[in-house]
Image (tube, rainbow, N blue to C red):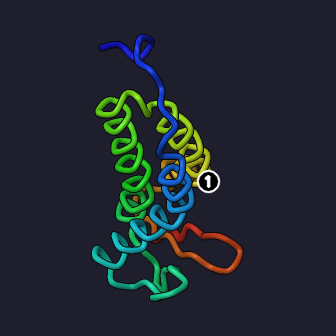
Amino acid sequence: VSLSRQEYRDDHAFLFLIALLLLGPLRKGLQVTLLSLLQGKVMPFSGKVTEPVGKYVYIFALMAPSVSISLIILICAFQFPSYAHYCAILISIHIGFCVPAFLRLYHLLHSPQKCYVEENEEGYEILITH
């Protein structure tokens, strides 16, 4: 069944609003959980990294929420084609939330191989080792 022939439904708008409100906290929570599992150096309530983290660990923790949440939304769009319009809105907003992570990824990919990432009040710093 193609999406163009499917009737779109709007009887679950409340669930859409809940999913929309949970996108940001879910993304941040997944990133903090990954960093704490991989490094164990995360402040519990602020989500800030307390000590420098390796470049590739930080890249993984930064990109994993982007990829996993996007895949879940895409799978839902194909599993429930009547609600694909909700999924399209959710994924577009989620990609908007991912833009800062993509910008950080760009800077990290152009940084030296052996470096660390440290978060502070102003954002993050890339620490280079010699």
Q: Residue 62 at what x, y percent from top left?
A: 45, 59
Mark 1, Cα crowd under 10 Å, few <14 / some 14-19 / many 20+, is few
Point 37% across, 54% down: residue: 64
The mark total stands at 1
Asked if residue 37 is positioned above or below residue 74 in the image, the reply reads below
Determine if residue 129 is in view: yes
Image quadrant in which the N terminus is located = top left
Using the image as rendered, state which of residue 69 and residue 55 is in the foreground: 69
Asked if residue 96 is positioned above or below residue 116 in the image, the reply reads above
Point 45% across, 66% down: residue: 115
When asked about the image quadrant of residue 61, the answer is bottom left
Using the image as rendered, state which of residue 81 and residue 37 is in the foreground: 81
Asked if residue 78 is positioned above or below residue 86 in the image, the reply reads above
Image quadrant in which the C terminus is located = bottom left
> From the viewer's perspective, is 94 left or right of 123?
left
Amino acid on which the number 1 mark rests in the picture: Pro
When asked about the image quadrant of residue 57, the answer is bottom left
Disc 1 marks which residue? 100
Q: Residue 27 at what x, y percent from top left?
A: 47, 61
Point 47% across, 32% down: residue: 9
Q: Residue furthest right?
A: 122
Badge 1 marks a residue whose secondary structure is helix
When asked about the image quadrant of residue 125, the answer is bottom right
Q: Residue 26 at what x, y percent from top left?
A: 45, 64
Determine if residue 102 is in view: no
Using the image as rendered, state which of residue 110 and residue 28 is in the foreground: 28
> From the viewer's perspective, is 78 left or right of 113?
left
